[in-house]
Image: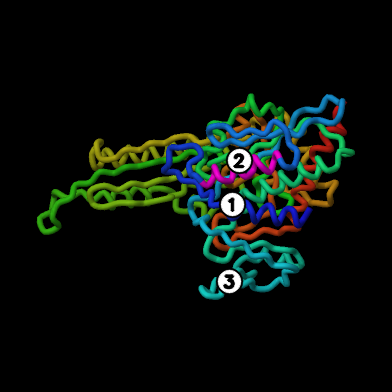
Amino acid sequence: MKQELIERFIRYAKVNTQSDPESSTCPSTQGQWELATMLVEELKAIGMEDVTVDENGYVMATLPANTDKNVPVIGFLAHMDTAPEFTGANVNPQIIEQYDGGDIMLNKEQGIILSPNDFPELAGYKGHTLITTDGTTLLGADDKAGIAEIMTAMNYLIQHPEIKHGKVRVAFTPDEEIGRGPHKFDVAKFGAQFAYTVDGGPLGELEYESFNAAEAKITIKGKNVHPGTAKGKMINSIKIAMEFQQQLPADEAPEHTEGYEGFYHLLSFQGSVEETKLHYIIRDFDREQFEARKAKMNEIAASLAQKYGNDRITLEINDQYYNMREKIEPVRHIVDIAHEAMTNLGIEPKVKPIRGGTDGSQLSYMGLPTPNLFAGGENFHGRYEYISADNMVKAAEVIVEIIKLFEQKAS
């Protein structure tokens, strides 16, 4: 299983599937189509049934039931795209056998080193087979590791028909990294009662709580006048934008928060005297605090509009997704089954909130309760990303164990 996982993952990682938030198509990039086509062929090759890819790039397939028990249809999902923040072109994965616990030279020419001095958790992988970047791209374990694990688990079950299971559906989705993963996902066509995204981080992660999330876009109009004659005339939009940022709580930002703490995150700041644009994301686990954060931004915008003129500041806030706990609590047994599966395999479950996005947040509100399982990666979205092949094996085994438990608990 380990070698199969490595080969699948590297094959997928080499396809550039970086999503593009500026694109209006679905998928947002051609590379995702390339991977979708590859996955369709591989699903057919291992013997999956009802293999489809729709006009929006959503890949689905079925593992038929081999039991007469009344087992709920469950699904497993992973996303095909990689993050826009760092290049996914020309990914060149490196395999480190029997990692010795020390520094890893990612790129000798550029002097890029993956070190436990910078990433202390790395030392815990001593003895593992690690897959790293070459220091010039991200790796794509988020979430091509999840794809490889689901594919390998399905292949294992097909090769071992003595393992009884109900009907299982799998799906590989586009554009999760830009928040659009479930937007065109056909829940009725998928036909599962419950599902799991395999999109988490280190070994044992099990998540069914997510942020409430929104994005805010602010446009500030200034008035540019020659600086030599600007007194009483110039209005510098950059300075107004800085004033906006300074009125937000300085310690309520990603670099100062953890656990259940929410934040405001300034993603981009682009401006000139004449016009400045700010792009924020707003995150909070508590719904009331989430609404309060949005209200705070509206209050600041209104105050600055009163000071500088109503026509100078435009604020647009759009909700992105909500805390999926509300939809998963009524069917908490699906979390309990995942917890039991990990325990059965000697894995310590680490139940914690997701401090990031997952398709499961939106899918749960679309009628498909979907907690999240670990995929095994670390340091997502950058050059220091890596994953343990040993833990990828454990992720695939958890998928198989969950499927077995649903069958065993059915009547």
Q: Which residue is mark 2?
A: 210
Closest to the observer: 158 or 139? 158
Q: CA distance from mark 2 to mark 3?
A: 33 Å
Secondary structure found at label 3 = strand
Q: Residues within 10 Å of mark 2 (few under 14, many from 20)?
A: many
**Residue 310 x %, y %:** 25, 36
SS at mark 1?
Answer: loop
3 or 1: tag closer to the N-terminus: 3
Q: Is residue 13 left or right of residue 156?
A: left
Type of the residue with mark 2: Ser
Say which residue appears at 29% left-offset and 40% top-offset.
Answer: 313
Amino acid type at image mark 1: Glu
Residue 382 lies, with reference to residue 148, above or below; the image says below
User: Looking at the figure, which quarter contains the C terminus?
Assistant: top right
Q: Which residues are magenta?
A: 31-44
* Secondary structure type for disc 2: loop
Residue 135 pos. (x, y %): 55, 66
Q: How many marks?
A: 3
Q: Earlier in the sequence, mark 1 or mark 2?
A: 2
Mark drawn on residue 258: 1
Q: Residue furthest left?
A: 229
Tell me which corner region of the image, top left, top right, bottom left or bottom right, holds residue 2: bottom right
Residue that numbered label 3 is attached to: 113
Quick check: 280 above or below 370?
A: below
Badge 3 amino acid: Ile
* Residue 104 position by quadrant: bottom right
Per the model, the C-alpha gap separating discs 1 and 2 is: 13 Å
